């Protein structure tokens, strides 16, 4: 799909996301923002395939996506992404190693993206951006640890309740089978759970 230029509103949303950690000077954005491009995806489009090296860091402007792995012909959803946040197989992007997950759109999607080379060309010149990345990675690691705690300690009902508390809008946007995959149950089991508990 051809690349496009981000809109002014999309770049403003991207800048606002960066400014959640207020360590970046305005002049840095003059160099960073023009490097981002935009692309649209239809629903159920594979963006990054397991085994490929993730070439881009994505910023989600529209839609819902997921990262998943496959084992014994069964898909296991690891994470959902949606506006306004980063997406992609981020560990593969940062390490430039083959992805252990597949990244796909679940709904019509619009993403901004920047290549590894373009991002780190700016990072290498600006210590503030390196500091920003370190802080954001710390928050990301914290989220991963919470997710691992849920996987190891929570019942399926508790996992479902935690997902609803964190991302209630997903339940109206994507098919139940992806939510079932995320909490580790069959779709029929999820339907029974949703009928029996109050979300």
Image (tube, grey):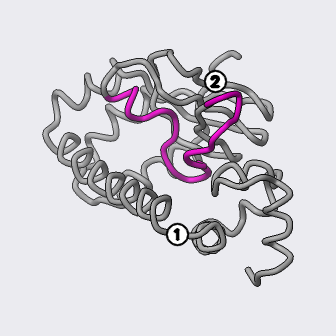
Quarter of the image for residue 19 reads bottom left
Residue 83, given in percent of the width and then of the height, sits at 60, 52
Q: Which mark is residue 109?
A: none
The part of the chain drawn in magenta is: 71-94
Q: Which mark is nearer the camera, 1 or 2?
A: 1
Quarter of the image for residue 124 reads top left
Q: Quadrant of the N terminus?
A: top right
Q: Quadrant of the C terminus?
A: bottom right
Mark 2 Cα shell of 10 Å, populated few (<14), some (14-19), many (≥20): few
Q: CA distance from mark 1 to mark 2?
A: 43 Å
Residue at point 25%, 28% (across, down): 122
**Residue beneath disc 2:** 4
On screen, residue 174 above or below 31: below
Queried whether the magenta region covers residue 177, the answer comes back as no
Mark 1 Cα shell of 10 Å, populated few (<14), some (14-19), many (≥20): some
Residue at point 83%, 51% (across, down): 175
Residue 115, given in percent of the width and then of the height, sits at 42, 21
**Residue beneath disc 1:** 154
Helix, strand or loop at mark 2: loop
Q: Nearer the viewer, residue 78 or 131?
A: 78
Q: Nearer the viewer, residue 142 or 82?
A: 142
Residue at point 70%, 28% (across, down): 73
Residue 69, given in percent of the width and then of the height, sits at 58, 33
């Amino acid at each position: 799909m051809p690349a496009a230029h981000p809109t002014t509103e999309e770049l403003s949303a991207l800048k606002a996301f960066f400014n959640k950690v207020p360590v970046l000077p305005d002049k840095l954005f003059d160099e960073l923002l023009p490097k981002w491009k935009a692309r649209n995806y239809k629903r159920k489009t594979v963006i990054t395939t397991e085994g490929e090296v993730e070439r881009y860091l994505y910023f989600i402007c529209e839609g819902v996506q997921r990262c998943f792995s496959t084992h014994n012909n069964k898909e296991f959803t690891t994470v959902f992404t949606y506006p306004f946040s980063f997406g992609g197989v981020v560990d593969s992007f940062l390490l430039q190693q083959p992805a252990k997950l597949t990244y796909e759109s679940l709904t019509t999607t619009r993403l901004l993206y920047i290549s590894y080379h373009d991002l780190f060309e700016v990072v290498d010149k600006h210590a503030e951006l390196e500091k920003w990345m370190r802080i954001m990675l710390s928050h990301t690691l914290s989220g991963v640890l919470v997710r691992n705690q849920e996987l190891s300690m929570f019942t399926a009902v508790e996992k479902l309740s935690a997902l609803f508390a964190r991302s209630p809008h997903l339940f109206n946007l994507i098919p139940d089978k992806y939510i079932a995959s995320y909490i580790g149950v069959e779709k029929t089991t999820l339907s029974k759970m949703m009928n029996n508990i109050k979300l």
